[in-house]
Image (cartoon, rainbow, N blue to C red):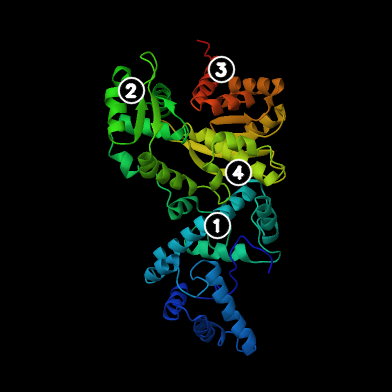
């Protein structure tokens, strides 16, 4: 059988078997796959396929076993895995059972890649079929065999949890977020801290695990991101020393005139950074997750790859990293790789701090951003209901593109933020420089939008 990144599911489908009963048979016959296959054949295939030969009925039962194994419910010895045991314990609670399986599919079996690919296709006006879906997934490095029904069976299991609407590829976004376990609740370790310390740590972690960082830089980022006004004279006493005592940071004084140097500790990484990163990774596709753990400089280097899939992923990771510096919430990727050769990516972010805003980020891995590139994004704002367009270029932004963006900002309520290769280089050197870039762009927009009173 050709290699597949999606699990084989033939005869392991909710249209053919009952998950609760199959889990019971797996539990009863652990370590004895032949006995499991025989029980499945008797229960599902002898009666329903009475005209088929005994060999073919046995083959169908064997396919069920292979599907159960491909979905990670049993190991190669026929023993229930940790996921299989969890599902078995939930067998009498239908809703929770199917939601747990759906979460496993989304997080561990490329289910998120499939869902995001379907959303991208629908946004592009493409009809979702197994043939077209296979091509779009292939562009993202996710393979399943020609003629295979792997995504269809996966869709059926996700439909049982409400992720897909009945008998369609329409995604229920709220259910998707709930099933994946993405919440906006504060992490317990952060929730125990005073608000100023909490915002300071979150801003510090938004900068990544590099460093050390200047305490005043972290303070500026926290203020700009969360709107919290720190007591500048009391920063050390109210924020820095308590966080150092709690074991979250180490602090090194440089000179009396300079701000202390701050370094993240292992405790902060374990108790806060890793849980936060895990929460973020639940929102992204399987192949993007490893890049979120890489420094920004390494991601930029991968944009030079000859592999267009690698370039497309790196471009998406670049957008993700830049927008996470200011703690915007990732919504989804609208387009990556398909028909672009890894040259562009469209990513949507949102924020609910003070007011709701939607940020439409276009990353271009090309020498120049043209007027047409900006015009395309402006045209999409009505469909996406965006407030802010961010154009990120690893090259230059052309004069015509800038003039067009100026006209759009002057004549509408849109803000168009331009980030070029020089800006990216400066942000790599010091991530807090993103504040300089965004402030520059905000002042430019404000000047264009001056009211004539």
Using a 10 Å C-alpha cutoff, classify the residue at mark 3 as few (fewer than 14 neighbours), some (14 to 19) or many (20 or more).
some
Q: Position of residue 262 (x, y in %)?
A: 39, 28
Q: Are marks 4 and 1 in contact (CB under 8 Å)?
A: no
Q: Which mark is residue 444?
A: 3
Residue placed at 59% from the left, 40% from the top? 316
Q: CA distance from mark 4 to mark 3?
A: 28 Å
Q: Position of residue 452 (x, y in %)?
A: 53, 11
Q: Quadrant of residue 399?
A: top right
Instruction: Identify the element where label 1 is drawn.
Output: helix
Which circle's residue, 1 or 3, is located before the other in the chain? 1
Instruction: Identify the element where label 3 is drawn.
Output: helix
Q: CA distance from mark 4 to mark 2?
A: 37 Å
Q: Nearer the viewer, mark 3 or mark 2?
A: 2
Picture mark count: 4
Q: Which residue lies under the disc numbered 4? A: 334
Q: CA distance from mark 2 to mark 1?
A: 43 Å
Please say if 268 is above or below 439: below
Q: CA distance from mark 3 to mark 2?
A: 27 Å
Q: CA distance from mark 1 to mark 3?
A: 42 Å
Q: Nearer the viewer, mark 2 or mark 1?
A: 2
Which circle's residue, 3 or 2, is located before the other in the chain? 2
Which circle's residue, 4 or 1, is located before the other in the chain? 1
């Amino acid at each position: 059988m050709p290699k597949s990144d999606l699990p084989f599911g033939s005869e392991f489908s909710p249209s053919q078997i009952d998950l609760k009963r199959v889990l019971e048979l797996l539990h009863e016959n652990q370590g004895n796959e032949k006995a499991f296959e025989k029980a499945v054949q008797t229960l599902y295939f002898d009666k329903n396929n009475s005209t088929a030969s005994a060999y073919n009925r046995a083959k169908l039962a064997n396919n069920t076993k292979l599907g159960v194994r491909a979905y990670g419910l049993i190991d190669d010895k026929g023993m229930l895995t940790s996921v299989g045991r969890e599902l078995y314990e939930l067998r009498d609670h239908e809703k929770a059972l199917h939601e747990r399986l759906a979460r496993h599919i989304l997080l561990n079996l490329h289910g998120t890649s499939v869902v995001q690919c379907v959303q991208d296709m629908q946004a592009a006006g493409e009809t979702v079929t197994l043939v077209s879906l296979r091509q779009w997934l292939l562009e993202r490095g996710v393979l399943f065999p020609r003629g295979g029904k792997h995504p269809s069976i996966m869709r059926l299991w996700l439909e049982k949890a409400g992720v897909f609407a009945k008998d369609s590829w329409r995604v229920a976004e709220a259910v998707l977020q709930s099933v994946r376990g993405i919440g906006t609740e504060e992490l317990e370790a952060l929730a125990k801290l005073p608000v100023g310390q909490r915002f300071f740590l979150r801003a510090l972690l938004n900068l990544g695990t590099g460093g050390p960082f200047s305490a005043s830089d972290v303070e500026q980022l926290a203020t700009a991101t969360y709107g919290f006004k720190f007591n500048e004279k009391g920063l050390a006493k109210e924020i820095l020393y308590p966080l150092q005592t709690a074991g979250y940071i180490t602090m090194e004084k440089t000179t009396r005139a300079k701000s202390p140097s701050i370094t993240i500790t292992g405790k902060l990484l374990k108790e806060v950074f890793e849980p936060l990163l895990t929460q973020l990774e639940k929102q992204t596709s399987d192949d993007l997750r490893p890049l979120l753990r890489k420094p920004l400089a390494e991601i930029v280097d991968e944009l030079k790859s000859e592999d267009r899939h690698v370039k497309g992923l790196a471009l998406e990771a670049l957008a993700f990293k830049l927008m996470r510096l200011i703690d915007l919430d990732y919504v989804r990727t609208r387009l990556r790789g398909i028909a672009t050769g890894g040259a562009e990516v469209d990513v949507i972010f949102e924020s609910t701090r003070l007011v709701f805003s939607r940020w439409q980020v276009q990353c271009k891995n090309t020498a120049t951003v043209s007027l047409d590139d900006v015009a395309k994004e402006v045209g999409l704002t009505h469909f996406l209901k965006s407030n802010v367009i961010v154009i990120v270029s690893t090259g230059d932004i052309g004069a015509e593109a800038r003039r067009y963006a100026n006209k759009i900002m002057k004549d509408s309520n849109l803000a168009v933020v331009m980030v070029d290769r020089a800006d990216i280089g400066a942000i790599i050197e010091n991530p807090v420089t993103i504040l300089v870039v965004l402030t520059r762009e905000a002042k430019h927009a404000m000047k264009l939008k001056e009211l004539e009173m």
